[in-house]
Amino acid sequence: MRAMVYRGPYRIRVEEKDRPVVEHPNDAIVRVTRAAICGSDLHLYHGLMPDTRVGTTFGHEFIGVVDEVGPSVQSLKAGDRVMVPFNIFCGSCFFCARGLYSNCHNVNPNATAVGGIYGYSHTTGGYDGGQAEYVRVPFADVGPSLIPDWLADDDAVLLTDALATGYFGAQLGDIKEGDVVVVFGAGPVGLYAAKSSWLMGAGRVIVVDHLDYRLKKAAEFAHAEIINFAEYDDIVVHLKKITDHLGADVVIDAVGAEADGNLLQHVTSAKLKLQGGSAVALNWAIDSVRKGGTVSVMGAYGPIFNAVKFGDALNKGLTLRMNQAPVKRQWPRLFEHVKNGYLKPSDIVTHRIPLEHIAEAYHIFSSKLDGCIKPLIVPTES
Amino acid sequence: MAYTSEKPKLPESIDELRARIPGWGADLDPKDRPSVPREIYDPGATGAHWDFPERQPEKWPRERSIEHAFLTPVFGTSCPPKGLSGVIRKYAYRRFSEARAAHWLLLIAADRVDVAESRITGLLRGRPDNVIAQTGVRSELTHRGLSSRLRDRRVDVVHQPLDAVIAMAPYAVAAGVAYSVIKKRRKR
C-alpha cells in the first residue's frame, strides 16, 4: 500500500509499505477514505516530539471503510463506513471506565503520562497513522463508530479530532452565560473552540493570532472579534484595556508548542528542541485571564520541561484545565449540533490534496502558504 | 470595571447574541455538557467486552516505560528499534523514567542518529533521499510562496529560514566531518 513516511525533520515521502495486519483479536483494518493533517502533526514534522522514528506514518485524523476485522470484533464488519477517534483506548482500564478515554493505560507501553494516539510517535505508543491507504485500528469494538448516513466525509473526518478538541476546549473553560472568552490561535482548533464558546453562552469571544487570513476566517466562521497581536507592542496590555482592565473570564490556548510572538521561546523550543514547546500563548493566557479565571489548554506540548509563568497562575488563583480530548464522548452532542446547522466542520477546509503529494501539503500547512487553514488528504487506492 | 464590584457590561445583550449567533446557548447549562462531570464511572458504556484485554503477541522485546508494571496488552509495532539509534532508545527506556530529563533528551538524540543512519542506509539501498521532493518545497512556486509571506504582518517569517538549516543539518554535519577527515589526512 502507499503510505506517508517520515524521513527526518521537515522531510517526508510516500512509500510502498506492507498493508497492516490484524495483530490482536479486536483489531480492524480500515481502508482510509479521507485523512487530515493536524496542527499537532507539524510538531512531529518539525522533529519536536521525542521518539519520532524514521519510517513512521503520521495521521491521527482519518475515516474509512472497514476492510477486515479480528475474530473478537462484534460491532463492525467489512464494508462499514467508520470514523475513528484519534485516541486509541481499551474501554476497560481504570481511566476508560471513568470516561477518560484519552488517558487509557492499556495501549501505550512507551509512556504512562499520555495515552495511545495513531501516528504520533512512539511516545504515544508507536502506532502507524492514517495518512496511508490502510491503517490498523485497535479495539474496534470500542473506538470507531459508524458514520451516520447524513454526515459527509469531509465533515466526519474533522470530528475525529479538530472539532471534538475545540469543543472540548470550550467545555474545559467552564464558560458561563455572559463570560468573556479569549482564544489564542485561529487555526482549526481555535476556530472550533471560538464557535463552541457561543454554544456555551459566551457573551464575547475574541480570537488572537498573527495571520490576517485566519483572523478573517475567525470573524466569518466563528463570529468572533479579532486581534492581530503583531499590531501591538504588548498583547496582554491590549487585552486588559478592552476588558475594562479585568481580563477575560476564560482563555483558551489553541496554539501549543510552536507558538510565535517571542523569538527566544520559539527558537529554543520549535527549532532547537530545548523545551517541550514554546509557551508564549500559554503565558499570554495566564497573564490575560482575570484573577480567579480559567485557562483551558488545548494546544499540544511535548513531554519535556517548558518555561511557563507558573507563579502568575498561582498568584491569580487560576484554574488551569487541560487534557487530550476524549473524542468519542463528544460525538453524540456534536452530531446534534452539526445536524441542527450550528456547526459545519468542513467550512474551514482550504485544501484537498492527494496522498502522493503529501510532502507539498505539509510544506504548505507548515509555512502557512496559500491561505491554508485545514488540508485534507485523499488517499488513492492501489 | 476591575476596581469596582460590578461586571463590565457586554457590548451586545444576550438577546442580540441569541439572534445573531446560530445555536447560541445550546449548551448553556454547565452540567449538561458531554465531558461534565469529568469522571463518570460507567465501564459498560465503552463497548469493551473484557475486564482486561487479551494480550497482543510480543514479536520482539518491546521497549516500555519503567513506570508501567508490565508491557501493555496492546501496542504499536511500527519501526522496531535498530542500529545505534535503537541502542540509545532501548537504554533510555530501560534506565530512566518519564520523570527524568535524561529519558527525553536521549530519545531526542536517538531521533537525530536515526535520521543520519537512515540517510546512509537509503543511499546504500539505492533509494537516496530527494531533498526537493521530500521537503515539498516545490509548493513555494505553485502555492503563492512569496505573496503568502508578504501579504500579512506575519511574525514567523523572521525564523522560517532556520527551517531550511534544520532540514539540511545532517548534510552539513556530514560535510563537516568529511572536511575535517580530509584535512587531517592531508596534514599527514
Image: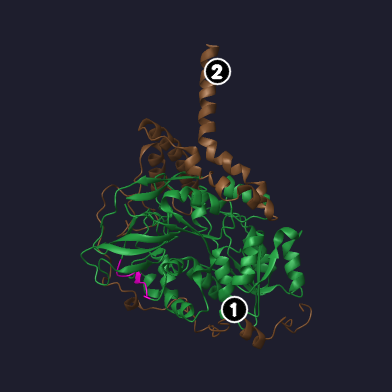
Chain colours: A green, B brown
Percent across and percent down for residue A81 are 33, 68
Question: Mark 2 highlights which residue?
Answer: B183
Q: Report helix, strand or loop for mark 1.
A: helix
Q: Report helix, strand or loop for mark 2.
A: helix
Cα–Cα span, label 2 and label 1: 66 Å
Percent across and percent down for residue A29 are 29, 60
Residue type, numbered disc 2? Lys
**How many numbered tags mark residues here?**
2
Residue type, numbered disc 1? Trp
Same chain for mark 2 and mark 1? The answer is no
Percent across and percent down for residue A292 are 65, 75
Q: Few, some or many C-alpha atoms within 10 Å of disc 1 (few <14, some 14-19, many ≥20)?
A: many
Overall secondary structure of the magenta stretch? loop
Q: Residue furthest top?
A: B188
In which quadrant of the rendered view does residue B129 lie?
A: top left
**Disc 1 is attached to a residue of which chain?**
A
What range of the chain is rendered magenta?
A140-149
Q: Few, some or many C-alpha atoms within 10 Å of disc 2 (few <14, some 14-19, many ≥20)?
A: few
Question: Mark 1 highlights which residue?
Answer: A198
Indicate left or right for A10 with A228 as reference.
left
- Report whether residue A224 is seen: yes
Q: Residue furthest right?
A: B3
